[in-house]
Amino acid sequence: MAIETWDSPYIVIWLCLGVLVTVLTFGTRGYSDKLNGLGAIGYSMVIGALAILDGAALGQTMYDKTEKVWGSLGTMLGLSGPLIVSGLILIVFYRNRVVKHPDEVTVKGENLEINESYLLGGITSFMTYGLLAAGIGSINIVMDIVEDKEGAIYGLAGLVPLVVAIWLIAKYSKWMFKYIIWVLRRKGLLQVVNDKEEDPK
């Protein structure tokens, strides 16, 4: 099927449902500890491929020859949206997993020790690529709006979304673990190791 014929919202809906089913399967298996590295890679590749197709389909659906910016907006939302939403869904599964296994997150002194998790890897990759796609897509939207207008201000304005995306990428992991620690502390499950108690002296 040629991409030019992907101008039906039903295709977008089916692609989004495909992402949802895949990420829910990913999260459920990760929560139940039935996920291996190969499976995590497979689910991630399927979600990534569906997100790319969704970006192309939504961009084509919203495209208007007189207003190219709508096509750029659709592509950006269709690509970054499923990735970011997938990351947020996996955060919920990861939260439930650490509540079930609170020893996976331990506060030791001023350090936070975290056991490796395929769920955590999925969250990191989906949120990173989703935010980057949103930033780069926003640059294209800005460029479509200003078109051939010249000036350094317009050039710098186009970089702002990417800078914001990179800043969010640097911050979201810290915010996520603050949330996880808050959940564990509220439930009385937070594992805190006192270095002084471990010191035999």
Image (spheres, rainbow, N blue to C red):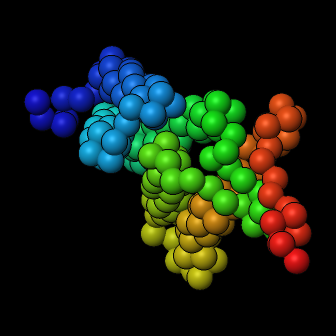
- The picture places residue 84, in percent across and down from the top left corner, at 53, 43
Give the quadrant of residue 103. top right
Q: Residue at x 34, y 42 (%)?
A: 36
Vertical placement of 190 versus 99: above or below? below
Vertical placement of 96 versus 131: above or below? above
- The picture places residue 192, in percent across and down from the top left corner, at 81, 53
- The picture places residue 185, in percent across and down from the top left corner, at 85, 40
Vertical placement of 100 versus 17: above or below? below
Front-most of 139 and 70? 139
Q: Residue furthest front?
A: 200
Q: Residue at x 40, y 25 (%)?
A: 25
- In the image: residue 141, left or right of residue 4: right
Give the quadrant of residue 52. top left
Front-most of 169 and 148? 169
Q: Residue at x 63, y 36 (%)?
A: 101
- In the image: residue 151, left or right of residue 13: right
Which quadrant of the figure contains the N terminus? Answer: top left
Report how many numbered discs are placed on residues in the image: 0
Is residue 36 among what the camera can see? yes
Which quadrant of the figure contains the C terminus? Answer: bottom right
- The picture places residue 167, in percent across and down from the top left corner, at 66, 66
Front-most of 145 and 194? 194
Q: Residue furthest top?
A: 10
Q: Residue furthest left?
A: 1
